[in-house]
Amino acid sequence: MKRNADIGFFTNPSIVDTPFIQHPESNPMSLRRFYMPPEMVQLPQPEISGSDAGHIYRVLRLSAGDAVELFDGIGNGYRAQIVSASPMRVRFRIEKTFPLLSESSVHITLAQGILKDRKMDNLIRQLTELGIDCWMPFYAARSVPVPVEKGMQKRLGRWEKIALEAVKQCRRGRVPCIRPADNFEAMLATSDEFDLKIIFWEGAPQAFDIPETTPPSPENIMVVVGPEGGFDPGEVQLAKTHGFLTIGLGPRILRAETATLAACTLVQYRFGDMGPGILTMS
């Protein structure tokens, strides 16, 4: 994939500089796109400051009167005009608000057994692109990393930044929430709110096979995938007592990160916006 020097993912964390097609009223083919926090958008003249402003002013060479697009990370897009620009601060005037239409109809929470090294960094980027609504890391019995609160806080901050960068790159309208890491039992305790709960396990007798008794159109789905060593059988049994379906991913042994991406893709295809239903959308 060719790297675009103007995508915030590689250069500046507030800027995406590629054609943007989300809503017929946005007419965005020549517009630059920037992230703006929801609380900032509500101000009379919202602004971007610091190094982000410097990038807009010096690199993109935008100035007063230029039209741009803003998005707030919670599903809204904004047609705006630059009111003033300097290397330290760029102010905007909001002219129109419109919904961003790139979110899946199903809300997927992906609970991931914590992996070692930087595998989690890559996963949060890819899962954001696949459209998950929330990411919940947890420590399983066979997780290699051990819980370290100080280091985990730093990792959470990095994951939040990676998720935001991925949202800009893939043209999503919402930034997925990232919950603090917890243990397996505490993760299961949060599952009552979901319409469908699936734990993917290499010991499951069948591959992706959803029972006929499953609600045909669940709105909130929880997907649980284990760490490198997989799940302890006792963990799988505990998940079953919480109402989880146990499902496999075929006869081959997958790397943990491959299993996570495959699980998310299958669920999004079966219930969300990656399956045949997307072809009927206007």
Image: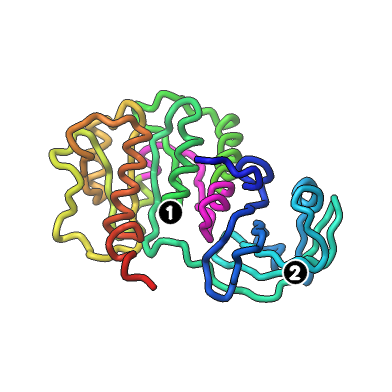
Using a 10 Å C-alpha cutoff, classify the residue at mark 1 as few (fewer than 14 neighbours), some (14 to 19) or many (20 or more): many
Task: Say which of 3 and 189 sits in front.
Answer: 3
- Counting from the top left corner in percent of width and height, residue 6 is at 66, 47
The residue indicated by pointer 2 is 81
- Counting from the top left corner in percent of width and height, residue 177 is at 51, 51
Task: Say which of 23 and 37 sits in front.
Answer: 23
The residue indicated by pointer 1 is 131
Residue at the image position 35 percent from the left and 60 percent from the top: 273
Residue at the image position 78 percent from the left and 52 percent from the top: 53
Q: Which mark is residue 31?
A: none
- Is residue 152 found left or right of 12 in the rendered image? left
* Residue 174 is one of the magenta-drawn residues: yes
Label 1 – label 2 distance at C-alpha: 29 Å
**Judging from the image, what secondary structure is the residue with disc 2 in?**
strand
- Is residue 240 found left or right of 118 in the rendered image? left
Q: Which residue range is magenta in the image? A: 164-187
Quadrant of the rendered structure where residue 92 is?
A: bottom right
Residue at the image position 75 percent from the left and 69 percent from the top: 81
Q: Are marks 1 and 2 in contact (CB under 8 Å)?
A: no
- Counting from the top left corner in percent of width and height, residue 56 is at 76, 53
Type of the residue with mark 2? Gln
Please determine whether, in this image, residue 220 is positioned above or below residue 230. Answer: below
- Is residue 247 found left or right of 98 in the rendered image? left
Please determine whether, in this image, residue 232 is positioned above or below residue 277. Answer: above
